[in-house]
Amino acid sequence: MKLADKGELSLLERIRKRFKANAKDLIAGIGDDSAAIFPLDRALLLTTDLMTEGVHFDLDFSTYFQIGFKIISVNVSDIYAMGGTPRFVLLDVAAPGATDDSMLDSFFDGVRKAIDRYKVLLVGGDLSSSMVLTVSATVAGYALRPVTRSGARPGDGIFVTGSLGDSACGLELLKIINRPIAVESGDRMNRPLSWAAMRPLLIRHLLPEARRPGKISGVASAMIDVSDGLLIDLWRLCEESGVGARVFMRRLPVSPQMKKAATFLNLDPDFLASSGGEDYELLFTAPRGRKIANAHCIGEITDSERIVVERDGTERPFSHEGYQHWR
Amino acid sequence: MKLADKGELSLLERIRKRFKANAKDLIAGIGDDSAAIFPLDRALLLTTDLMTEGVHFDLDFSTYFQIGFKIISVNVSDIYAMGGTPRFVLLDVAAPGATDDSMLDSFFDGVRKAIDRYKVLLVGGDLSSSMVLTVSATVAGYALRPVTRSGARPGDGIFVTGSLGDSACGLELLKIINRPIAVESGDRMNRPLSWAAMRPLLIRHLLPEARRPGKISGVASAMIDVSDGLLIDLWRLCEESGVGARVFMRRLPVSPQMKKAATFLNLDPDFLASSGGEDYELLFTAPRGRKIANAHCIGEITDSERIVVERDGTERPFSHEGYQHWR
């Protein structure tokens, strides 16, 4: 059945039943003009990100489930990148009238999955028709001590929480595969590479998980999530902190699967690792000598110059290299 | 110059300079992963609304300024409808690469105008490219005592803060005029009706102002803003409160300009007043006998039946009549 046959009220009623939330800090949720929450005695974080068809996803190789999961993950990632704990979600869904309601159900299955994963509550949002599928989420969370982008100091180490370039490499594979792969329901394939080789890369792109900072929140002097690419995001952190950076290409963590697939795709793994977007790893700085579990030191903060040291030891300045909209 | 020639970072920098905010309850604003705020000791309200080209606005008869102003107003209206005070705004802007940056400037002029009007701070958001212009805002605000939709009780009076149907009537005029009217820069016209007759209707549609509840917050038992139409929004309030309503058509406040234009357009003023959307008046209930300044009593809350009493005294049940997406 198409949305055009059912209307907004019927969809809203279904969403409301599925996402019914009761919590001590929630006064009013879905179904009122605003959500009303009673903040705990700490900083409140607010973030929003939008995804639209033809730019952030392609229905030719994404399932609705994946889009639902991802819109929550990318927003939660921004809360984590402040050292916070996500708590409430508002969701705007704008979909063409010809969208089948089973597709919307699948979208909300993905939202449900992510919401359960991150232990957050859907408390409001907006439903509307549109020319192209567009979804936007706002996530509110708490932090005892928000970790901003502006606290990096010369001498701090630069760290990243996991392998880089996997998501960008997964996207390149998808362009060749050129059909949606419903990994969430066991769908798989063995071309152009084996499923074992492709799986982690595809999942990283289609169903990215935000990286919980855990103890990093307590030691990081500055933090950002890698959404547009390591170098552009590091550049952003440097801009906010008014510092420089020296990054060693040979220290960037890359997965064996990414190296293998990049070789097959005739792409440079170093390029994918340094400029590929959507890995949603945390990139942070911390005073030297702090022991950081589960993070890779990739360089250090300097006074002003922003330098990449290539594998052969040559140095080159870097600027905002990575994904920029309208570029 | 087109967005495609400048890129996201350059636009972000411009926005950031224009909307620089310093406030005691703001820890981190534009330029970090999330906004970080320190909530005052009261309920926090969160709301979001999205507007997309071809559905919520038509670039053939809206200016970018108007879209910028309106996306803030419609969200602030939801905070007011909870009896709250708006405070922080996040803004998602997704625009095609071919958009001229002077148009985006004009959009942000409208945002600026609204933000100054409502005394709120822009503290974050997301910029991206898209196939069609889509904007979405999230507004956070505070309330000492949130007024939900669910507190109406049988015997309460039903009130509305101002004239109904003006915005819908303005939209019908615009469809005839069929070009943008930049009222914000003094643009005007005298066809098909005189400017004096059309002005309030057009402004109501193009640059709607959210209605500050003031003392109403202290007396209302339930409240909602009229965004989709009086009857559908009253129906929503009744649903949430588990009550009925009796509304008198002859008591609906209508402006003389709307009556005149409706006659010219061959439309029924009563229909526009009861089912036209986007007036952003507050619709609320309050215990009988409470004195309510600046509000019109249009009926009363009953146990369960939802009835419209027509001008001739005949009664008919009403359901969710008004704007519904995908219908």
Image (cartoon, coloured by chain):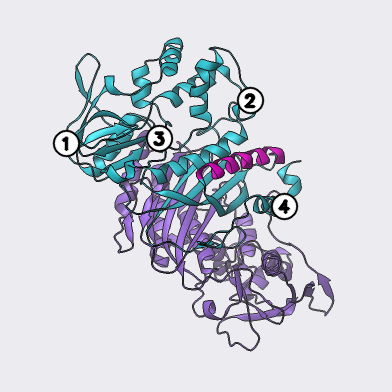
Chain colours: A cyan, B purple
Disc 2 or 4, which lies upstream in sequence? 4
The residue indicated by pointer 3 is A227
Mark 4: give few (<14), some (14-19) or many (20+) Cα within 10 Å: few
Residue bearing mark 2? A186
Kindly indicate the quadrant of the structure image that contains residue A255: top left
Read off the residue under disc 1: A155
Q: Quadrant of the C terminus of chain A?
A: top left
Instruction: Report the Cα–Cα distance between label 2 and label 1.
Output: 47 Å
Amino acid under disc 2: Gly
**Disc 1 or 4, which lies upstream in sequence?**
4
Assess whether residue A72 is covered by the magenta stretch.
Answer: no
> From the viewer's perspective, is A295 left or right of B205?
left
Residue A242 visible to the viewer:
yes
Q: Do the CB atoms of the residues marked 1 and 4 lie less than 8 Å apart?
A: no
Residue B95 x, y percent position in the rendering: 47, 41
Which image quarter: residue B19?
bottom left
Q: Which residues are magenta?
A: A99-118
Q: Nearer the viewer, residue B233 or A117?
A: A117
Q: Does residue B135 sit above or below A201 in this rendering?
A: below
**First along the sequence among labels 2 and 3:** 2
